[in-house]
Amino acid sequence: MDKVESARKDDMQSIGSDLSEQIKAKTRDIHVRAENTQLMLNYQKGQITLPQYKLLLFSLYEIYRALEEELDRNASHPGVSPIYFPQELARLETIERDLEHFFGKEWQKRVIVPAATQRYTQRLHTIGKDDPNLLVAHAYTRYLGDLSGGQVLGKITQKSFGLSSGEGVSFFSFPGVSSPNRFKQLYRSRMNSIELTKEEREAVLEEALMAFEHNIQVFDDLQKMLSITEETSENQQATLIRPFSILH
Ligand code: HEM
């Protein structure tokens, strides 16, 4: 075992046995990778354009549709019920509202997502059917992210596009959560109350890495789509996007 590996092992041992602490420690490095994807770096610098934001919303729509469908279906599963907070957290309707704001009532016909988004949603459906204990890893990754860095991104979005009335940015707003920090504490304690065997817990921790990896791949794919579209004229865009897309 080299020095780095041994330091990491010591670090893990001092973390304690709570799932919330272990998952945070496990995903620390990959969180940095997610923050440093080109899309997120541009976002943080306020360099996201409206077409980019609209494209991101389509992927978020597909991801939350799959995540929330599986959480709803498994609402009474012992690995899901403690962290099932549809009133406070559900995002699908907020994204639908934002999409309607930008594209009008017919927005569903316009949905375009890259292949990475499809792989992510397939994974969510697979575990929802075969191993619902793993859903907590995905719910944690998205919802706690939305309540953390996501709140900063929400302010940047609103400012960048001058959306002062909140229209088009409902996704970032959680009216059912008065204090994100207090809610995150509650969520962590609920995560810690889930009974898991050692193997099941290990699988949840691995799945959290996978959840971050899926997000990174979605961001990278979106970035690729965006650089292609930026280099081409309006007419060419449709042709170039199609290979990555599913159209409803
Ligand atoms: C937590 C920033 C992207 C998932 C946090 C926290 C900050 C932050 C400041 C709070 C840390 C703490 O309370 O100790 C950012 C920034 C991002 C970004 C600036 C990009 C611009 C992401 C992405 C994901 C994500 C892409 C996953 C899809 C999470 C999660 C937490 C978190 C799950 C909760 C950690 C925990 O308390 O266990 N983020 N983040 N973040 N973020 Fe991010």
Image (spheres, rainbow, N blue to C red):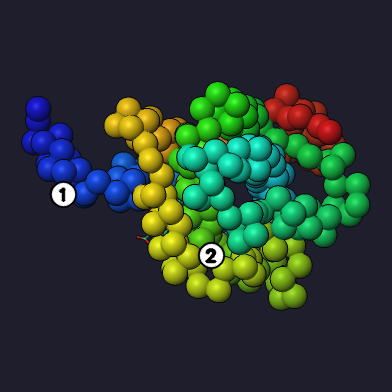
Q: In which quadrant is the C terminus drawn?
A: top right
146 to 108, vertically: above or below: below
Q: Relative to 200, is 132 on the left or the right?
A: right
Ligand 1 location (quadrant): bottom left
Circle nearer the N terminus (2, 1): 1
| Whether label 2 touches label 1, CB < 8 Å | no
Give the residue drawn at x 12%, y 43%. Answer: 10
Residue 77 picture quarter: top right
- Residue 9 percent coordinates (x, y): 15, 38
**Mark 2 within 8 Å of ligand 1, using the beta carbon:** no
Q: In which quadrant is the N terminus drawn?
A: top left
Given residues 116 and 184, the one toward you in this image is 184
Mark 2–mark 1 Cα distance, whole angstroms, equals 30 Å
Give the residue drawn at x 53%, y 57%. Answer: 146
Given residues 30 and 161, the one toward you in this image is 30
Count residues near mark 1 (Cα–Cα under 10 Å), then give few for <14, some for 14-19, many for 20+.
Answer: few
Q: Relative to 88, is 21 on the left or the right?
A: left
Q: Nearer the viewer, mark 2 or mark 1?
A: 1
- Residue 72 percent coordinates (x, y): 65, 43
- Residue type at tag 2: Gln
- Residue 66 percent coordinates (x, y): 66, 37
Residue 46 visible in this rendered orientation of the protein: no
The residue where tag 1 is placed is 14
The residue where tag 2 is placed is 151
96 to 112, vertically: above or below: below
Secondary structure of the residue carrying numbered label 1: loop
- Residue 188 percent coordinates (x, y): 40, 55
Secondary structure of the residue carrying numbered label 2: helix
